[in-house]
Image (spheres, grey):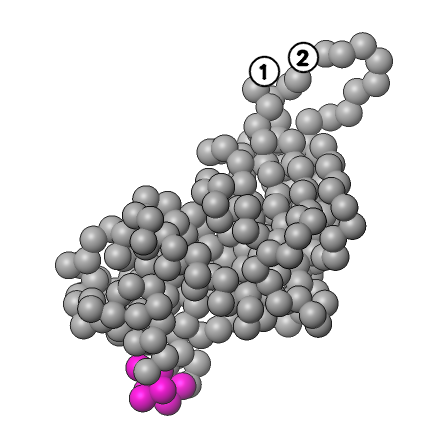
């Protein structure tokens, strides 16, 4: 997705010509392309994900419609907007957990190369933080020694080195949240989906998460983040603003 100057598209609210009318409740989607480089390492211009005409409705309510964009290797994309605008739903559609109502998603490769960091990661509470973070690489057949070393380094990067051998149920909510991020990034996926990865974190922990996600893009991972955090959104290469028009 090469920058071509700021662009705004209003989708999902219905167009209108003639006299002004009161806005209907719906979702306005704005795509804003940064003029300055963000985190990413996008020299290869390899498109990993193409989204065309994507729409999602729940009952009579339309979350978004006709959403079109691409995501390249090493690109960071922030999905922002108020609660209820469809941020988490869009991530879930990309991950394959939720079906869209319309449109198409095309991947360069398969969804098997995508890692997902939800707001509440389903960790193994009786196992240690290190065990949880090692799991994705062990499933992929990594050498146990190498998996342990890489998982330990990832926990250190996120300020969790001292808790590597602590069972997850003894960790605080913020510590468990960072373990979830560590487990998602440890296998160096081609694409990472992160749902509010800095929510409720203290400034130190938030910085550690931001730096970890930045390193992912520098290594070529495409990172898509649903966030309310303006600091995170501002540093991303591209933003999708999902804004709810009130009646």
Residue 92 location in percent, x, y? 51, 51
Res. 16 visible in picture: yes
In this rendering, the answer to whether 119 lies above or below 158 is above
Q: Nearer the viewer, residue 184 or 90?
A: 184
Q: Nearer the viewer, residue 238 or 115?
A: 238
Question: What residue is drawn where x is 62% and y is 53%?
Answer: 237
Q: Which mark is residue 22?
A: 2
Question: What residue is drawn where x is 55% and y is 46%?
Answer: 234
Q: Nearer the viewer, residue 155 or 97?
A: 155
In this rendering, the answer to whether 44 lies above or below 79 is below
Residue 133 location in percent, x, y? 32, 71
Residue identifier under label 1? 247
> Is the residue under label 1 in contact with that under label 2 (CB below 8 Å)?
yes
Q: Which residues are magenta?
A: 142-148
In this rendering, the answer to whether 18 lies above or below 98 is above
Check if residue 119 falls in the magenta segment. Answer: no
Query: Among all residues in the image, which is located at the extreme right?
Result: 18
Res. 46 visible in picture: no
Residue 34 location in percent, x, y? 66, 48
Q: Secondary structure at mark 1?
A: loop
* Relative side of 163 to 192, left or right: left
Quarter of the picture holding the N terminus: bottom right
In this rendering, the answer to whether 147 lies above or below 246 is below
Q: Residues within 10 Å of mark 1 (few under 14, many from 20)?
A: few
Quarter of the picture holding the C terminus: top right
Query: Among all residues in the image, which is located at the extreme front?
Result: 36
What predominant SS class does the magenta segment belong to? helix
* Relative side of 157 to 43, left or right: left
Q: Earlier in the sequence, mark 2 or mark 1?
A: 2
Q: Quadrant of residue 244?
A: top right
Question: What residue is drawn where x is 64% and y is 72%?
Answer: 109
């Amino acid at each position: 997705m090469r920058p071509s100057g700021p662009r705004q598209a209003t989708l999902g609210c219905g167009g209108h010509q003639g006299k002004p009318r009161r806005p209907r409740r719906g979702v306005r989607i704005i795509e804003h392309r940064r003029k300055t480089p963000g985190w990413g390492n996008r020299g290869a211009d390899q498109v990993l994900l193409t989204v065309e005409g994507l729409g999602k409705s729940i009952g009579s309510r339309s979350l978004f419609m006709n959403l079109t964009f691409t995501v390249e290797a090493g690109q960071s994309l922030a999905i922002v907007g108020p609660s209820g605008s469809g941020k988490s739903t869009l991530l879930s559609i990309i991950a394959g957990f939720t079906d869209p109502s319309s449109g198409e998603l095309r991947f360069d490769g398969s969804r098997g190369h995508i890692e997902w960091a939800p707001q509440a990661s389903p960790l193994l509470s009786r196992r240690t933080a290190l065990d949880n973070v090692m799991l994705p690489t062990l499933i992929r057949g990594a050498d146990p020694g190498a998996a342990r070393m890489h998982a330990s380094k990832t926990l250190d990067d996120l300020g969790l080195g001292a808790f590597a051998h602590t069972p997850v149920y003894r960790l605080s909510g913020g510590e468990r949240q960072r373990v979830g991020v560590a487990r998602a990034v440890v296998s160096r996926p081609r694409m990472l989906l992160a749902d509010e990865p800095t929510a409720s974190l203290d400034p130190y922990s938030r910085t550690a998460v931001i730096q970890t996600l930045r390193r992912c893009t520098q290594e070529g991972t495409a990172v898509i983040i649903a966030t309310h955090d303006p600091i995170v959104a501002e540093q991303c290469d591209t933003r999708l603003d999902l804004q709810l028009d009130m009646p």
